[in-house]
């Protein structure tokens, strides 16, 4: 019993230490704007964008641990033309009135040395949650020379099949595959 | 002899004009995006929401031309902060240079009469420089949506903005800019 308690204390100490070493970063929404690509009629690659996001990242690089919570506000959809935005925001596609957010959550970051290279987590779109692993490229932490603040940044990409989330309208005229790109810039709290 | 030559020349000149077809770009589906590297790390994307263009095509003769115009005041970075004083408007000098124009009358075709590149000139900040753009997935067919004859493709180009005199914020905002334009154009 004593040993168990001791183990419990040791466990708590370890957890506290890991917590102390971890830093929290808040994403800069001005430089963390997700865009997505679809194939239109099998002809062209058309792009859309969500202009409003929020998110937090916890990083403990020495322990190669971390987590991320990222929210996309669907009513910030911006296709470049008003008519097209309204169309893509409507029921059957992003259905933004019923589903105001899309989220990605992960507490399983993959490292290569001290660089994050991927994050394994869950993506929620149209209220449907599915596992998703996103790729992280050019991950880097340092001081932003413009504002002298500590920043971590990288380019995040993922491919999803929208039909997995129940978004089946206009397949295959508008491709089932969606390529998502999110440049992420996050500042240490 | 002179008259004969003249007639022959005229006939020759008229023929491609007859065979060439003119296409007008669908403004909702030819929205240009550009990508730059921010602080050497992230790929940030900007967009111009208004652009228009015309293409002439004569695949049999491997000839064609394009004129494509972007309205700089339609700059949209996604942050909702575009005003006459914003960094974007100042970089593109929107008030002074309302358009960015690409012109080409030199199309490259592959063996299957598909356009693969276009060599021409880009005018940005009033500076005109040669630019060759790549054309991927070029295709002409009937659009299943509206049954109209359409030609389309994805256009890519890379340029150094400093060559056009746009040097502010280099290197925090990269000199190299990558441009993508999906083009869907309907036969007039």
Image: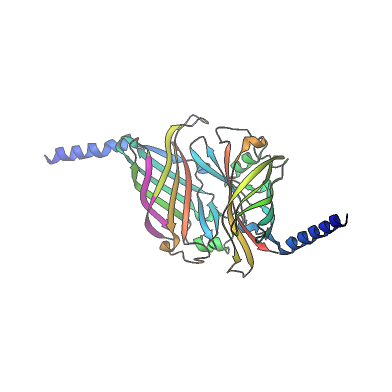
Q: Which residues are magenta?
A: B115-132
A48 or A146, nearer to the observer: A146
Q: Position of residue B72 (x, y in %)?
A: 50, 55
Which color scheme did the rendering employ for the protein? Answer: rainbow
Residue at image location 64% in from the left, 68% down from the top: A149
Q: Residue at x 23, y 36 (%)?
A: B11
Examine the rendered structure and indicate whether residue A175 appears above or below residue A121.
above
Q: Quadrant of the N terminus of chain B?
A: top left
* Whole-percent x, y for residue A107 in the image: 70, 51
Asked which quadrant contains residue B185, the reply is top left
Residue ID at (35%, 49%): B119
As drawn, B187 above or below A11: above
User: Magenta stretch: dominant SS?
Assistant: strand
Left or right: B66 as drawn, with respect to B12: right
A22 or A124, which is in the foreground? Answer: A22
Residue B129 is covered by the magenta coloring: yes
Q: Residue furthest left?
A: B1
* Residue A135 position within the rendered picture, expressed as x and y whole percent measured from the top left: 58, 49
Q: Quadrant of residue A179?
A: top right
The image quadrant of residue A184 is bottom right
Quick check: can you spot residue A15? yes
Total marks shown come to 0
Going by the image, does B88 lie left or right of B122? right
Name above or below for residue A97 compared with residue B175.
Answer: above
Asked if the magenta segment contains residue B152, the reply would be no
> In this view, which residue lies farthest toward the right?
A1
Residue A167: percent from the left, percent from the top? 64, 35
Q: Quadrant of the C terminus of chain B?
A: top left
- Is residue B93 at least partly visible in the picture? no
């Amino acid at each position: 019993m004593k040993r168990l308690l001791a183990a419990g204390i040791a466990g708590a100490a370890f957890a506290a230490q890991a917590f102390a070493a971890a830093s929290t970063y808040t994403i800069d929404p001005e430089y963390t704007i997700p865009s997505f690509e679809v194939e239109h009629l099998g002809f062209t690659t058309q792009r859309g964008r969500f202009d409003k996001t929020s998110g937090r990242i916890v990083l403990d690089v020495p322990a190669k641990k971390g987590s991320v919570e990222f929210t996309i506000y669907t009513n910030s959809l911006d296709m470049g033309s008003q008519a097209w935005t309204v169309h893509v925001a409507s029921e059957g596609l992003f259905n933004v009135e019923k589903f105001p957010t899309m989220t990605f959550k992960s507490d399983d970051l993959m490292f290569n040395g001290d660089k994050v290279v991927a994050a394994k987590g869950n993506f929620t779109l149209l209220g449907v949650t599915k596992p998703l692993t996103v790729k992280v490229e050019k991950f880097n932490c340092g001081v932003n020379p413009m504002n002298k603040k500590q920043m971590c940044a990288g380019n995040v990409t993922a491919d999803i099949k929208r039909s997995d989330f129940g978004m089946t309208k206009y397949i295959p005229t508008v491709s089932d595959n969606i390529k998502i790109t999110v440049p992420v810039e996050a500042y240490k709290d | 002899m002179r008259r004969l030559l003249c007639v022959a020349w005229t006939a020759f000149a008229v023929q491609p004009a007859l065979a060439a077809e003119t296409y007008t770009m669908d403004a909702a589906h030819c929205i240009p995006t550009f990508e730059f590297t921010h602080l050497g790390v992230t790929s940030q994307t900007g967009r111009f929401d208004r652009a228009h263009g015309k293409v002439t095509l004569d695949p049999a003769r491997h000839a064609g031309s394009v004129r494509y115009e972007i309205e700089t005041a339609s700059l949209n970075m996604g942050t909702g902060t575009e005003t006459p004083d914003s960094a974007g408007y100042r970089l593109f000098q929107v008030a002074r240079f309302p358009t960015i124009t690409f012109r080409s009358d030199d199309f490259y075709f592959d063996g299957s009469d598909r356009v693969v590149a276009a060599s021409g000139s880009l005018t940005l900040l009033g500076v005109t420089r040669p630019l060759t753009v790549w054309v991927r997935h070029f295709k002409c067919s009937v659009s299943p949506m509206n049954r109209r004859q359409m030609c389309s493709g994805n256009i890519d180009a890379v340029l150094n903005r400093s060559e056009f005199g746009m040097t502010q914020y280099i290197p925090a905002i990269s000199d190299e800019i990558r441009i993508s334009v999906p083009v869907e154009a309907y036969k007039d």
